[in-house]
């Protein structure tokens, strides 16, 4: 006799709505048999118009009570936020040995080690496929499919809103603010876009992937984060003239010194798969010592893909398998040593705004030479308004600390009108 | 106390050697704990030089005896071949309730339904991640990660040898036979290359993926198979002139009429991710009603990736989870209705070799018009040797049956010197 699993769903936004619709249409979707039936729900507003009639489910004002309800076998947390009711409800469920499925990247990135310990000490799964890359199963791949390898890096595009914005800025030569306002109007971006455009959402996601890839504790506090909010149309245009597209990339790299987790704008050569990832699509490279390199690309968000990811987690719970939350038992999870950012090596793009007068180029190139910055390409654009002249250069591989030093020196030159804009260039 | 799992490995070629090395170095690799230790091995030759000293393992001349040995907890089958000792040994293991991990695509594609029934009736896993796309986890993704969706198609490049050959032919303007001979000398292609270049290996793999994607019985017999052995340098060059690269694609598509499983050369626009998949790399698109489209790319073969895939399967066995082999219980697996090939619609490339004389073009275009074949682009190349002139055209979307009829009529024209070469064009 196949078991029926009673699902409590807290948070009935886009993803929650998609999940209710799915479970209503296909309660018997799990290939191994058994049924998954929504028993209770919780959300901020009971009366808001929804695509599914929720009056047939038990209603809970407090998600913690839904988690604790004897009618909840699996608790699905789609509330969001790293603390507050989401965390309280997840903890309540785990303490009662109830499996938890969540799409909450902030919660897992910021409290993952603690929650993993709680889940594992109660021997229940804590799954979060929907937290990263929507319906593209990056989490399962890293947690289960690549355990026969040692992963050395994961890197890609993890925020669809930012990728939509930079794609649109480039394609139609529009300003950041203009595209953002449109994205907000269309519902692609939140009313407060900080989490997305500031890079924090991508940082949550890459923090989670790094923990899965390297078997370490998620260490969001150590992530270096720079968003797309400072990426101007001028840089997008200049980058294009040099053969690049700007993408907000997230990367986690393990070396013998530790782990670096970073989110920042990056110039990707036009032929690079990340440059060719346009619109709200997400993409990820996984590099391992045995598998070489795997590339994954797919929708990063949306009700359909994200609800499908949460449903797959529910089916996983129903198999009865319990694995470590982060590819190593919680008791052995350590926060990795962060790699000193200044020691990073790479090529960079540098854009200066200088006075339109003789001798400027000489002053700039001399300063760069003094700091040992070797130039790979150089572009000066004609002035349009008789004011500041943009000059842009790309360097050969160099320590980021040396670039920072050169930039500080350049900023101090009287001919240089604003601090140089520096953007890293992707390795081929 | 963590359990030790004794692994019997049958077949010690590239993948088997890679797996022995891995388990020797990391017996405790499974994140959930437990050890995986090789207990016994079997291969055709005991004395062949190997990278791992096998004298410490129990030796079995007969893989069936290794499968049956009380010292074998998990049986790993890396012998290959759809019948014979591989099948006998897998059956012997399953009947004794021993989990089986295999890289044998021929076995699973040709006897998958029968073996799934055997595995499920004994409640043991039968896993084969290493059978498709090497270290790129297409099998796990379809079996586990996308169960919250309805998959409508899987399509891509599944044979690295063929992709290496067509990539190399195009890049260096070399003949098929020349590149194949080099690939054989380097060990990229088998001494008998039929399985690869004839498209049969890709057909085995897409048959397996179709069963996983659609929850149906693998139906290798119904696959339409055309290899790359008829792809000439001339077609590669002409396709390139028109903005395409030729790839051996494998696809499985589900419609309301049934399932079509096909392997054939395909013209892919230069900007298409499959055109940009070069060398021995594999790639796969998965299209679902909820997830939209996911793209996966990675190494399709090699000791490292394939051994890593087999190791991940071993770790899965060690979790104790048992799922249906093909995403639906074996008892409910049905061979899908095959879609009548002549009803396929698509654009095609047609290359004719015609006499260099007046009126030929008129005769050809008139015949095409009579059969309702609408031309999208047309290319005639100057004659070099005063003999046959290649003319090539691409069509608008049309039924393949109409193309076949037009081709037969063209072949009968006195001006047409050989049967037209027809290659399908990928949808964008």
Image (cartoon, coloured by chain):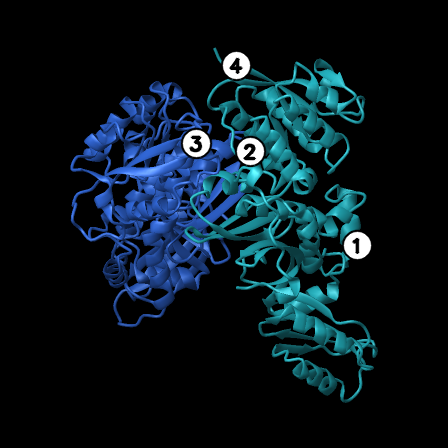
Chain colours: A blue, B cyan
Residue tagged 4: B3
Q: Earlier in the sequence, mark 2 or mark 3?
A: 3
Crowding at dot 3, Cα within 10 Å, few <14 / some 14-19 / many 20+, comes out as few
Chain to which mark 1 belongs: B
Identify which residue, A54 or B16, lies in the foreground: A54
Q: Position of residue A244 (x, y in %)?
A: 44, 58
How far apart are labels 3 and 4 at the CA level? 29 Å
Chain of the residue under the numbered disc 4 shown in the image: B
- Mark 3–mark 1 distance (CA, rounded to whole Å): 58 Å
Residue B178 disc label: 1
- Residue B366, image x and y in percent? 69, 85
The reply to the same-chain question for discs 2 and 1 is no
Residue in view at x 74 percent, y 25 percent: B50
Q: Nearer the viewer, residue B357 or B2?
A: B2
Q: Tell me the CA gap for discs 4 and 1.
A: 52 Å
For numbered disc 3, what is the local secondary structure? Answer: loop
């Amino acid at each position: 006799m196949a078991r029926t699993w009673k699902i409590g769903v807290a948070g009935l936004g886009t993803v929650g709505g998609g999940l209710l619709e799915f479970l209503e249409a296909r309660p018997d979707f799990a290939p191994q048999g058994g049924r998954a039936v929504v028993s209770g729900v919780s959300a901020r507003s009971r009366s808001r118009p929804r695509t599914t009639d929720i009056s047939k489910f038990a209603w809970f004002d407090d998600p913690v009570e839904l988690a604790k309800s004897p009618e909840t076998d699996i608790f699905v947390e789609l509330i969001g936020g790293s603390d507050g009711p989401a965390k309280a409800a997840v903890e309540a469920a785990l303490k009662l040995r109830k499996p938890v499925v969540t799409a909450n990247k902030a919660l897992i990135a910021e409290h993952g080690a603690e929650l993993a310990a709680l889940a594992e000490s109660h021997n229940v799964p804590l799954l979060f496929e929907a937290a990263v890359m929507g319906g593209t199963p990056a989490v399962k791949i890293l947690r289960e499919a690549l355990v026969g390898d040692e992963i050395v890096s994961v890197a890609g595009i993890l925020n669809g809103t930012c990728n939509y914005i930079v794609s649109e800025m480039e394609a139609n030569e529009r300003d950041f603010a203009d595209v953002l306002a449109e994205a907000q109007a269309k519902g692609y971006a939140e009313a407060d876009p900080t989490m997305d455009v500031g890079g924090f959402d991508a940082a949550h996601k890459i923090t989670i992937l790094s923990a899965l890839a390297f078997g370490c504790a998620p260490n969001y506090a150590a992530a270096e984060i720079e968003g797309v909010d400072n990426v101007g149309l001028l840089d997008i245009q200049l980058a294009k003239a040099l053969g690049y597209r700007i993408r907000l990339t997230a990367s986690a790299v393990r070396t013998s010194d530790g782990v670096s987790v970073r989110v920042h704008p990056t110039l990707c050569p036009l032929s690079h798969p990340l440059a060719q990832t346009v619109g709200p699509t997400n993409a990820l490279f996984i590099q391992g010592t045995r598998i070489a390199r795997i590339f994954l690309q797919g929708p990063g968000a949306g009700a359909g893909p994200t609800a499908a990811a949460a449903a797959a987690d529910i089916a996983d719970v129903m198999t009865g398998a319990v694995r470590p939350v982060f590819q190593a038992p919680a008791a052995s999870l350590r926060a990795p040593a962060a790699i000193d950012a200044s020691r990073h090596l790479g090529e960079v793009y540098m854009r200066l705004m200088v006075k339109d007068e003789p001798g400027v180029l000489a002053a700039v190139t001399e300063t760069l030479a003094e700091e040992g910055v070797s130039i790979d390409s150089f572009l000066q654009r004609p002035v349009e308004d008789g004011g500041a002249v943009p000059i842009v250069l790309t360097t050969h591989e160099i320590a980021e600390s040396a670039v920072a030093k050169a930039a500080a020196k350049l900023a101090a030159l009287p001919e240089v009108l604003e601090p140089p804009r520096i953007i890293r260039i992707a390795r081929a």
